[in-house]
Image: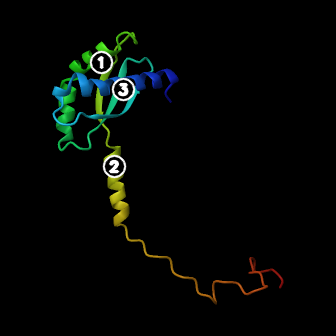
Amino acid sequence: MESKRQQKFASLLQQDLAAVFQRDLPHLFPGLPPGISTVRVSPDLGVARVYLSLLLVKDSEAVLRDIRDNSKAIRQALAKRIRKQVRVIPELNFFLDDSASYAARMDEVINTLHIPPAPAPDDETDTPTEGKRPKLFADEDE
């Protein structure tokens, strides 16, 4: 479980990294800039795991490779934004966030399932007669 300090720092990183992708380094990302779904920070705030959402990109692996290749430039641009707020600029590790595609796949699987409807109960056999309780044990007296 993350501490409040980690959560606040992760939120700061998420906002500033989004600004870096959109404003400072848009030339690195042709088309739409990647969306940042989650940022997880180590307890010492030295390492940040950044999960990117690349839903509208055709080749997400290639984009992730480009981002990892340019991680030094991304970290420098981030440092310019947050250098007065933090002591150490964290090392950035980028990962694909596949939770949305996984959810879409599970939704597709659930929609293709064929579940037959439950059989209707027979009126004579399944319902107890009026006024009588059903027997729970064999040794009950009537």
Q: Residues within 10 Å of mark 2 (few under 14, many from 20)?
A: few
Give the CA distance from mark 3 to mark 1.
Answer: 10 Å
Residue pictured at 21% horizontal, 24% vertical = 25
Nearer the observer: mark 3 or 2; the answer is 3
The label shown at residue 102 is: 2
Nearer the observer: mark 2 or 1; the answer is 1
| Mark 2 vs 1, N-terminal side | 1
Say which of 103 and 30 sits in front: 30
Q: Position of residue 98 (x, y in %)?
A: 31, 43
Q: Position of residue 60 (x, y in %)?
A: 21, 40
Say which of 126 and 6 sits in front: 6
Q: Position of residue 87 (x, y in %)?
A: 39, 9
The answer to whether marks 3 and 2 mark residues whose Cβ atoms lie closer than 8 Å is no
Say which of 100 and 29 sits in front: 29
Give the CA distance from mark 3 to mark 2.
Answer: 25 Å
Residue under numbered circle 3: 15
| Mark 3 vs 2, N-terminal side | 3
Looking at the rendered structure, the secondary structure element under dot 3 is helix
Residue under numbered circle 1: 78
| Mark 3 vs 1, N-terminal side | 3
Q: Residues within 10 Å of mark 1 (few under 14, many from 20)?
A: many
In the picture as drawn, the residue positioned furthest to the front comes out as 23
Q: What is the three-letter code of the residue carrying label 1? A: Leu
Q: Position of residue 141 (x, y in %)?
A: 84, 83
16 relative to 116, above or below: above
